[in-house]
Image (spheres, rainbow, N blue to C red):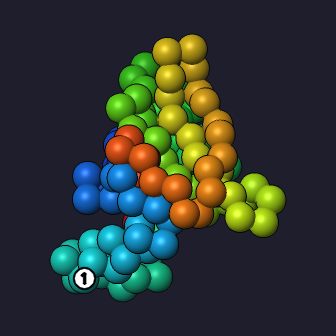
Amino acid sequence: LDWAIVAVEVLPESRGRNYMEQKTVIKQYAQRHQANERRIQRRRLIDALYDCIVVKAITKEEILTKTVDLTETKVGRQNFACVNFGDKGIRVNDVGRTQGHQQMGISPSW
């Protein structure tokens, strides 16, 4: 297992953008924080789910309640998995790489 630092919500500047536009946001984010682009990555679905479960179990708080994390995990050929914490628990869905939504963004891990 590896340790990573993850934000509790997505990067504000990544919201409303599609998958490819979010890749540009990650590069800009890395440059702004003088970090190597390889260190800052989009999480996989399993990592995002694990983070949601562990944070809830330990702190009794929920992450990704206001936003949706578009992960690196592919669903089919063109879609990617996304995850958030809804009123009834953790929600997993998939969206196309060209889709954007005002609540969907990237919650990168360091």
| Residue 94 sits above or below residue 3 on the image | above
Q: Quadrant of residue 34?
A: bottom left
Q: Is residue 70 left or right of residue 44?
A: left
Q: Position of residue 17 (x, y in %)?
A: 39, 59
The quarter of the picture where the C terminus appears is: bottom left
Q: Is residue 96 above or below residue 36?
A: above
Q: Percent x, y for residue 61?
A: 39, 23
Say whether residue 24 is left or right of residue 51: left
Reading the image, the residue beneath label 1 is 31
Is 2 or 14 nearer to us in this picture?
Answer: 14
Q: Position of residue 88 (x, y in %)?
A: 57, 14
What residue do we see at 65% from left, 40% from top? Answer: 93
**In the image, what residue type sits under mark 1?**
Gln
Q: Residue at x 26, y 59 (%)?
A: 13
Q: Could you tell me which residue is drawn at 36 percent across and 85 percent down?
A: 36
Residue 74, quarter of the rendered image = bottom right
Task: Name the residue at the left extreme.
Answer: 32
